[in-house]
């Protein structure tokens, strides 16, 4: 999704793909550490080490955070694409009806 967004607005293809992937990975590991800390604090004697069960709860939240970053980036690209360039000053744009 980040690749197609960057390609649509012609903005740093590889950089935006890597930042999207990095956003997912950082949010996943941060939420994993947070959930392990909360579960170990809440349940002193029970060790939650099953990664599959933890992943089932963490991956959707990491995807939501990545989706929020995607929307912010999309809004930023859309805002930047509507700005007039210095070479466009003085040109009349006629819209066809």
Image (spheres, helix red, strand yellow):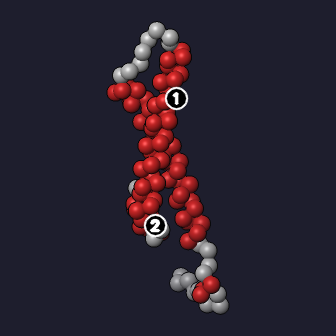
Tag 2 secondary structure: loop
Would you place residue 95 above or below residue 76 in this image? below
Q: Quadrant of the N terminus?
A: bottom left
- Mark 1 closeness class: few <14, some 14–19, many ≥20 residues within 10 Å: few
| Quarter where residue 79 is shown | bottom right
In the picture of the structure, the residue carrying the numbered disc 1 is 34
Q: Is residue 61 visible?
A: no
In the picture of the structure, the residue carrying the numbered disc 2 is 12
Would you place residue 91 above or below residue 83 in this image? below
Residue 90 in the figure: left or right of residue 15: right
Would you place residue 9 above or below residue 61 in this image? below
> Which residue is farthest right?
90
Question: For this rendering, which residue is in front, 56 or 47?
Answer: 47
Looking at the picture, how far across and down is residue 28, in whole percent?
A: 45, 38
Q: Which residue shows up at 41% across the image and 18% down it?
A: 48
Q: Which residue shows up at 62% across the image and 74% down it?
A: 83
Looking at the picture, how far across and down is residue 14, in whole percent?
A: 40, 62
Q: Which residue shows up at 50% across the image and 12% down it?
A: 43
| Quarter where residue 3 is shown | bottom left
Task: Give the total number of marks visible in the rendering.
Answer: 2
């Amino acid at each position: 999704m980040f690749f197609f967004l960057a390609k649509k607005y012609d903005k740093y293809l590889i950089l935006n793909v890597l930042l999207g992937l990095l956003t997912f990975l950082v949010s996943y590991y941060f939420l994993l550490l947070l959930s392990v800390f909360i579960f170990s604090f809440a349940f002193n004697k029970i060790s939650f080490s099953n990664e599959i069960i933890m992943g089932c709860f963490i991956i959707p939240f990491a995807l939501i955070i990545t989706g929020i970053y995607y929307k912010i980036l999309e809004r930023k690209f859309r805002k930047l694409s509507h700005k007039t360039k210095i070479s466009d000053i003085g040109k009349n744009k006629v819209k066809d009806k």
